[in-house]
């Protein structure tokens, strides 16, 4: 591999070994890993600094819903010992502090060009290089291109008429301002009651003059029961990090969480109630671990949904509000389960008003606020927590053009395709971390990112050892993987809700669950198997072919 500059029409293109797009967890680890392999690397990041979603999502109440000790890098024993988590579920400022600590500690920033969006990546078949153009007009070339663009990095505005007319403060959760935002005395509206909206509502409800929640689909949320981590607990974790990581790698979710082999109907109704109550009191995602069949047995799932609806009745004092908050018509856990500290309680505050937009639809956004069928709600501030064009959005938002002029954008119009969420047939030497058809979103994104980067690094070493210039999956292997992903998707209730998981939140997007639902440990097995037999599921071009081209 070399780093000589090659001429490009106009300005000279900078020649590298590896180009990495995105500086969230996946991109940061890729920068570190490939630098340690002695490769010439360059990262690009649209944001002003490292952190991905945690850089952008500075909204009030932003917090991770996995335990911090799991939701942290595992590749550096030193960093694990040097960093001390303060909370069981870290809030965004602590997470960003951690991310900055890692970037400083490993001196990653000098390899990343910030405030730079990649606008085009084109495979040059003759020279067997990716040619990458940025929004500054610069061109870079490298045999390898890593897309660490993230499954949730392209926010979407709601498709409601009149958004641009609103004259008050318009804030987007996913692009929250860096300066403090005041809510006191203001009439604030929020659209969106997914994980993001729930976190914002419970945080700002007590602060606003009045808060109007425009809810279309209610979400299920369970108590987080967050805690400050004590010194003894942290020491114990630090002694046992190796075991904790090992357990996470061998779990379905990439983290240490109770899992059960018990079927819902194998125990009596009163035992079920006791188990569900205990998990509610325990908090976090404990409820998901009470029974093994909650995502496959619709009847069991409905019992659990009803248990949570009962909790809403217990907490919310106004029966009509409680009823409107109860999710119906889709299985619990088929949408991302939310964790809260005081979400349902927030609706007991006299200044917080729930607007049920299933029965009283949003007609338009006006200069002054939101017009419902029942009339206009005047607002000083409107917050959008309306989600993302998930999984595929970021990679379809710019031109990624592989062999024979095929673009990812064209290819994925009919639905995301890839082999293992890592590579795409027709796109040689283009790798993804946490890509679609992998387990992204259903397991700990950091464990997946590390796994993916390690897998890519091993593939590169294989190519180096064997004097190979390019690699891509065979069409057959990709087809086999897509069939497996589809078969597994049919077995889970996750397919049965209209969510970003299935593309239902974006008009015109191909529908279907293009996530691997077989669990993280199984995913790792498939990725390992794909490299056995001399990478039989891939085609390679020898380096000599390039030399003589
Ligand atoms: P989301 O789950 O897709 O929720 C978007 C919300 O906006 C939904 O309530 C949706 O209602 C509403 N919405 C969209 N368009 C609308 C319209 N035209 N009118 C009315 N309502 C509209 O997005 P999110 O809350 O940002 O969460 C996305 C993912 O990010 C989560 O699933 C999770 O994976 C991740 N996340 C994690 C955390 C955490 O770790 N704690 C926090 C935040 C986010 P409909 O459902 O009716 O469309």
Image (cartoon, rainbow, N blue to C red):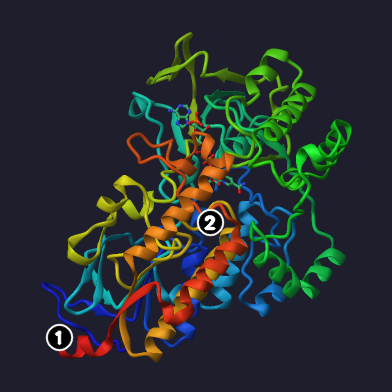
Per the model, the C-alpha gap separating discs 2 and 1 is 39 Å
The residue positioned farthest toward the left in the image shown? 9
Q: Say which residue appears at 59% left-offset and 28% top-offset.
A: 218
Question: Is residue 4 or residue 530 the one in the foreground?
Answer: 530
Which residue is at 56% across, 41% downward? 494
Rendering coords of residue 546 (x, y %): 21, 86
In-image side of 507 versus 84 (left or right) = left
Q: On the rendered structure, is 380 left or right of 83?
A: left
Contact flag, marks 2 and 1 (Cβ < 8 Å): no
Query: Neighbour class for label 1 at 10 Å: few (<14), some, many (≥20)?
Result: few
Question: In the structure shown, which secondary structural element does the residue marked by tag 2 occupy?
Answer: loop
Residue lying farthest to the top in this orientation: 374
In the picture, residue 541 is in which quadrant? bottom left
| Percent coordinates x, y for residue 279 in the rendering | 81, 42
Q: Which residue is mark 1?
A: 549
Q: Residue at x 63, y 41 (%)?
A: 296
Quadrant (top left/top right/bottom left/bottom right) for the C terminus? bottom left
> Where's the N terminus, which quadrant?
bottom left
Which mark is drawn over residue 439? 2
Q: Is residue 404 visible?
A: yes
Camera-nearest residue between 104 and 141 = 141
Of callouts 2 and 1, the N-terminal one? 2
Decide: is 517 above or below 134. Answer: above
């Amino acid at each position: 591999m070399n780093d000589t500059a090659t001429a490009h029409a106009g300005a000279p293109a900078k020649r590298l070994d590896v180009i990495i797009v995105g500086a969230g967890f996946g991109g940061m680890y890729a920068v570190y890993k490939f630098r340690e392999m002695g490769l010439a690397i360059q990262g690009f990041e649209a944001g002003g600094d490292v952190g991905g979603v945690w850089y952008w999502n500075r909204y009030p109440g932003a917090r991770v819903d996995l335990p911090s000790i799991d939701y942290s890098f595992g590749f550096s024993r030193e960093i694990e010992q040097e960093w001390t988590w303060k909370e069981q579920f870290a809030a965004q400022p602590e997470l960003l502090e951690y991310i900055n600590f890692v970037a400083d500690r490993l001196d990653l920033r000098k390899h990343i060009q910030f405030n730079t969006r990649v606008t085009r990546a084109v495979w040059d078949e003759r020279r067997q290089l990716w040619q990458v153009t940025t929004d500054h007009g610069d061109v870079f070339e490298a045999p390898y291109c890593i897309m660490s663009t993230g499954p949730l990095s392209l926010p979407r505005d709601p498709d409601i008429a009149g958004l641009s007319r609103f004259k008050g403060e318009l804030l987007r959760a996913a692009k929250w301002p860096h300066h403090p935002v005041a809510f006191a005395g203001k009439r604030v509206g929020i659209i969106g009651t997914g994980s993001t909206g729930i976190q914002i509502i419970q945080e700002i409800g007590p602060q606003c003059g009045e808060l109007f929640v425009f809810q279309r689909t209610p979400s299920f949320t369970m108590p987080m029961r967050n805690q400050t981590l004590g010194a003894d607990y942290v020491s114990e974790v630090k002694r046992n990090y190796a075991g904790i990581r090992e357990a996470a790698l061998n779990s379905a979710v990439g983290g240490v969480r109770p899992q059960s082999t018990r079927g819902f109907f194998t125990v009596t109704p009163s035992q079920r109630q006791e188990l569900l109550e205990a998990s509610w009191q325990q908090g976090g995602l404990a409820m998901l671990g009470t029974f093994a069949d909650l995502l496959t047995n619709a009847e069991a799932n409905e019992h659990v949904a009803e248990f949570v609806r009962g909790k809403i009745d217990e907490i919310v004092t106004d029966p009509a509000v409680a009823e409107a908050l109860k999710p119906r018509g889709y299985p619990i856990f088929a949408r991302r389960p939310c964790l809260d500290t005081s979400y349902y309680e927030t609706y007991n505050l006299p200044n917080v008003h729930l607007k049920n937009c299933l029965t009283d639809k949003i007609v338009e956004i006006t200069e002054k606020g939101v017009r419902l069928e029942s009339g206009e709600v005047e607002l000083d501030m409107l917050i959008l927590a309306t989600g993302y064009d998930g999984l595929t959005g970021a990679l379809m938002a710019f031109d990624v053009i592989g062999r024979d002029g095929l673009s990812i954008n064209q290819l994925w119009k009919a639905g995301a395709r890839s082999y293992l969420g890592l590579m795409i047939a027709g796109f040689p030497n283009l790798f993804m971390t946490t890509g679609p058809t992998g387990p992204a979103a259903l397991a700990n994104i950091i464990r997946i990112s590390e796994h993916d980067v390690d897998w890519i690094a091993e593939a590169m070493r294989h190519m180096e050892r064997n004097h190979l210039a390019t690699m891509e999956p065979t069409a057959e292997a990709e087809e086999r993987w897509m069939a497996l992903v589809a078969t597994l998707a049919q077995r889970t209730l996750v397919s049965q809700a209209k969510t970003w998981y299935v593309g239902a939140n974006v008009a015109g997007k191909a529908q279907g669950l293009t996530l691997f639902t077989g669990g993280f440990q199984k995913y790792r097995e498939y990725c390992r198997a794909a490299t056995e037999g001399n990478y039989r599921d891939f085609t390679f071009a020898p380096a000599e072919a390039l030399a003589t081209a």
